Amino acid sequence: MDSLLAVHVTGVAPGAHRIEWDETYATGPVDVSAHRLPDASDAPVARVGGARGGARLDTPDLARPYFRIAPMDAAALVVARRDVPLEGCVNFRDLGGYRTDEGRRVRWGRVFRSGHMANLSAAGKRDFATLAIRAVCDFRMAEEREAENADLPGTPALATLGIPPGVGDRQYFHRVFASTRDPAVVLEAVHETMRAIVRNAGSRYARMFDVLLAAHDGAVLLNCSAGKERTGIGAALFLSALGVPRDTVCHDFLLSRTYFPALSEVARVRVKYGVRTDTDDEAIALVMPLLETHVSYLDAAFDAIEQAYPSVDDFLARVCGVGVAERRELREIYTC
């Protein structure tokens, strides 16, 4: 198990964080320091020594602090809050910190993933600007971008990599919701969508990797409406190319359970797909498979890859243009 998964960073007040760990990571005293730089190579701006189990650090002057935790009985780690709390944004989080099969770590603050940013407030835009995002890989279709439009600070380069949110075309889930009142049918439609994405959208993910390979400076954002399925597959392919183990890739995928506000998105999805039911409770039950996150969704995508190709690495090479040389370059850029 990646020791990073035993450490949790949460915001407890404006400008204050609590870093906690369990005994699978460290049993003795731990020194914790807060830093401005994602690799924690700068002088600390706050420090707590000899903490056991957790520590609170106040960093009111830092938009996004990074924390170095140094136990006496385990390897030091750099950690950060996994989610990036941008006001008005959905499911925005950092892909940093995960351990690869070579013992390296994905760099913090280099690749983010998110859902739509249509409601990004002035404060959210201010905080977005601090992330130095230079490129966005947007997997939404044109009509989704029009309905969920946002002017992003810094005018990052936009790669429009439209992938239908369904099987075949953008009307897929309209047809599903018009034909059934059974949530199990919608659940299977999501599984089939995940399979269709990896079968049909390989060129879009190949372009995503082109953007990632070109981004030697600044950060890249992977983005779609919910930040769960199309973005989830993109993030999974990216982490897999870096050598992050499958169980950790699944862990990251499932974090949408925590960071995607499923219930508050019901109204948007009902409008988006024209969902008509007799009662609100029936509508909620019907759309929830599309708003929830299950490990079976990612399993469906990986199963579709592994049924058609000898391995995920072979899929990356043959479909996404990410062979041995490209994986080596990605690891040089995005791991340390």
Image (cartoon, rainbow, N blue to C red):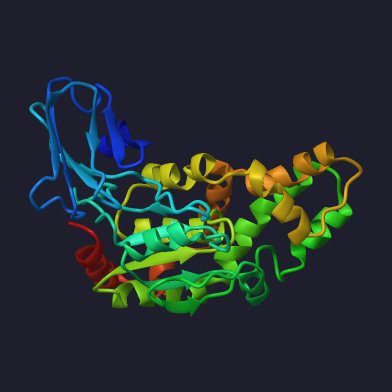
- Tell me if 88 is positioned left or right of 135 in this view: right
Q: Quadrant of residue 49?
A: top left
Image-quadrant location for residue 10: top left
Judging depth in this view, the residue of 163 and 133 nearest the camera is 133
Q: Is residue 325 left or right of residue 238?
A: left
Q: Residue at x 86, y 45 (%)?
A: 181
Residue drawn at x 27%, y 38% is 4
Dividing the image into 4 quarters, which one contains the C terminus?
bottom left
- Residue 96 at x, y = what percent? 30, 52
Q: Is residue 286 above or below residue 234?
A: above
Residue visible at 58% across and 74% down in the picture: 162
Please state if 319 lies on the left or on the right of 2 as rendered. Answer: right
Image position of 276 with respect to 202: above or below: above
Point out residue 274 in the picture as x, y percentages from the top left corner. 82, 59
Look at the picture and state if 306 lies above or below 170. Answer: above
Position of the N terminus, as image quadrant, is: top left
Question: Can the viewer see residue 148?
Answer: yes
Q: Is residue 86 above or below residue 14?
A: below
Q: Residue furthest right?
A: 278
Q: Position of residue 247 (x, y in %)?
A: 39, 42
Q: Is residue 74 visible?
A: no
The number of discs equals 0
- Horizontal and vertical percent position of residue 186: 75, 48
